[in-house]
């Protein structure tokens, strides 16, 4: 970065919630979102100072004049399925249902998922995410049969190849009975040997078992793994697997992190039951990631009938109770979700519309930036001393950004400087 050792990103609008827990400098506010009007002084790839907009010393090179546009830290995609991605055109969901997605993916996995096929699709997905400015991705990997044996060594190679561009983590996606099988220890050993590896599972209220949960938690404890679970991806009323996970974590005093994805059925319980379960989730220090696109696409689908509910977890109620909440891409152009492009600004815009994360926007911009980053072990807050890795959408307000999530944007990386986003516009 010799040509960019010291310079300024000029006239930005920084949302106070994206400064994180760092000391907030005294800066003027400008715009409808209470944003701070700032110049970011960059030195040796890091943010050296935050100054009032257009007040940076004249001798500094102007790396970019953003003319009052918003600035974000690079977003973090904490729940994806890179090994399933980009197969829609050869493997559609026959009826748009959850069962249809499972059957279609299972058939395609057996027929087509060679090492070369999976690697080429993961590389294509990562290039899309990188172009959109994504800093880190966690993917669930189907860990079944021959594919399971191939995909973890392949992921390790890709992880190393992308180091410095996108930080990658992976979760073993299995069914709960796998943790009661003879190869459970070998599975945990493989995951633990992978940097950032998580143990995972798909569980619903009608498939959860105390023995299975205890076996999974025991392996996580033994091998020092966190847990990242697919939970209650349905509209079942009267019971949730989420409660069983929380009670097990509390009883075992589990010290690792537990992230539960989907949790759609939580929105289907009575208010009293929902609030009781949320209290357990908070006590267990569980984080929740909602996948608004996929959840809206699959849940409450029936031929010839309009869906009656939105399929997303109760984000407002969870956040109000102090539970960390996040959103992510989940599936992209496969039978579980036919759309998407690994663009987290689009995911956030969908979440705002689907879950009413506005009036006011408040701290909701953290759900695809600071919160998932912290869960993955990264501090991406915009503050003095932090790496100068930011995204600069040509939008002056959150309303404009949500209205036009594909608005042109630039990505500033301390190692490469400023680059346009070829996927926007």
Image (cartoon, grey):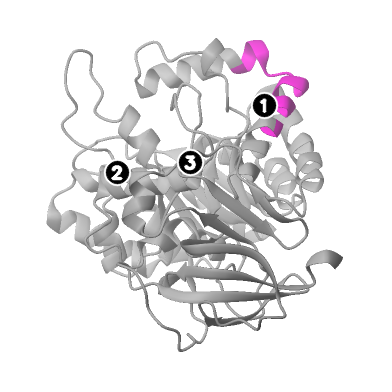
Of labels 1 and 2, the one closer to you: 1
Residue 87 vs 354, above or below: the answer is: above
Is 324 in front, or is 351? 351
Q: Which residue lies furthest to the right in this view?
A: 2
User: What residue is disc 3 on?
Assistant: 329
Q: Which residue lies furthest to the front in this view?
A: 58
Is 52 in front, or is 255? 52
Residue 285 rendering spot, x and y as whole percentages:
43, 67
Is 7 in front, or is 59? 59
Nearest to N terminus: mark 1 or mark 2: 1
Check disc 1: other Cα within 10 Å, few if <14, some if 14-19, many if 20+. Answer: some
* Secondary-structure class at tag 1: helix
Of labels 2 and 3, the one closer to you: 3
Q: Which residue is drawn at 46% across and 62% down?
A: 70
Residue 134 vs 20, above or below: the answer is: above
Residue 156 rendering spot, x and y as whole percentages:
78, 43
Residue 129 rendering spot, x and y as whole percentages:
61, 42
Check disc 2: other Cα within 10 Å, few if <14, some if 14-19, many if 20+. Answer: many
Decide whether residue 116 is among the magenta residues. Answer: yes
Residue 334 vs 269, above or below: the answer is: above
Q: Which mark is residue 328?
A: none
Check disc 3: other Cα within 10 Å, few if <14, some if 14-19, many if 20+. Answer: many
Q: Estimate the spatial distance between the alpha carbons at disc 2 and disc 3, rounded to whole Å.
A: 13 Å
Image quadrant occupied by the N terminus: bottom right
Q: Estimate the spatial distance between the alpha carbons at disc 1 and disc 2, rounded to whole Å.
A: 28 Å
User: What residue is disc 1 on?
Assistant: 121
Answer with left or right where residue 105 lies relative to residue 305: right
User: What residue is disc 2 on?
Assistant: 312
């Amino acid at each position: 970065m010799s040509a960019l050792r010291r310079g300024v990103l000029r006239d930005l609008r920084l949302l106070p919630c994206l400064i994180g827990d760092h000391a907030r400098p005294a800066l003027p506010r400008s715009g409808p979102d209470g944003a701070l009007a700032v110049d970011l002084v960059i030195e040796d790839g890091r943010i050296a100072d935050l100054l009032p907009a257009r007040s940076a010393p004249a001798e500094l090179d102007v790396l970019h004049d953003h003319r009052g546009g918003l600035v974000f830290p690079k977003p973090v995609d904490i729940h994806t399925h890179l090994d399933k991605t980009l197969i829609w055109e050869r493997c559609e969901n026959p009826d748009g249902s959850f069962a249809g997605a499972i059957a279609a993916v299972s058939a395609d996995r057996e027929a087509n998922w060679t090492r070369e096929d999976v690697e080429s699709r993961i590389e294509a997905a990562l290039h899309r995410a990188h172009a959109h400015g994504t800093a880190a991705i966690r993917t669930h990997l189907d860990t079944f049969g021959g594919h399971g044996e191939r995909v973890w060594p392949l992921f390790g190679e890709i992880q190393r190849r992308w180091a410095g561009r996108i930080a990658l983590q992976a979760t073993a996606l299995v069914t709960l009975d796998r943790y009661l099988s003879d190869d459970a220890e070998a599975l945990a050993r493989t995951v633990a040997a992978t940097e950032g590896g998580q143990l995972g599972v798909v569980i619903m209220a009608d498939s959860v078992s105390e023995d299975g949960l205890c076996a999974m938690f025991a392996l996580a404890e033994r091998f020092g793994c966190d847990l990242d679970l697919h939970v209650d991806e349905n509209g079942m009323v009267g019971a949730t697997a989420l409660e069983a996970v929380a009670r097990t974590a509390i009883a075992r005093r589990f010290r690792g992190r537990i992230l539960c994805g989907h949790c759609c059925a939580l929105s289907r319980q009575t208010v009293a039951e929902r609030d009781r379960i949320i209290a357990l989730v908070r006590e267990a220090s569980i984080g929740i990631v909602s996948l608004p696109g996929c959840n809206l696409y699959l849940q409450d689908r029936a031929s010839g009938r309009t869906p009656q509910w939105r399929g997303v977890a109760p984000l407002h109620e969870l956040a109000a109770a102090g539970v960390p909440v996040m959103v992510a891409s989940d599936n992209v152009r496969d039978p579980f979700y036919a759309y998407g492009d690994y663009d987290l600004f689009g995911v956030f815009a969908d979440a705002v519309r689907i879950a009413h994360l506005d009036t006011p926007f408040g701290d909701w911009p953290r759900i695809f930036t600071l919160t998932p980053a912290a869960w993955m072990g990264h501090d991406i807050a915009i503050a003095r001393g932090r790496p100068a890795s930011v995204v600069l959408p040509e939008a002056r307000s959150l309303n404009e950004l949500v209205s036009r999530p594909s608005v042109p944007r630039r990505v500033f990386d301390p190692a490469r400087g400023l680059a346009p986003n070829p996927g926007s516009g």
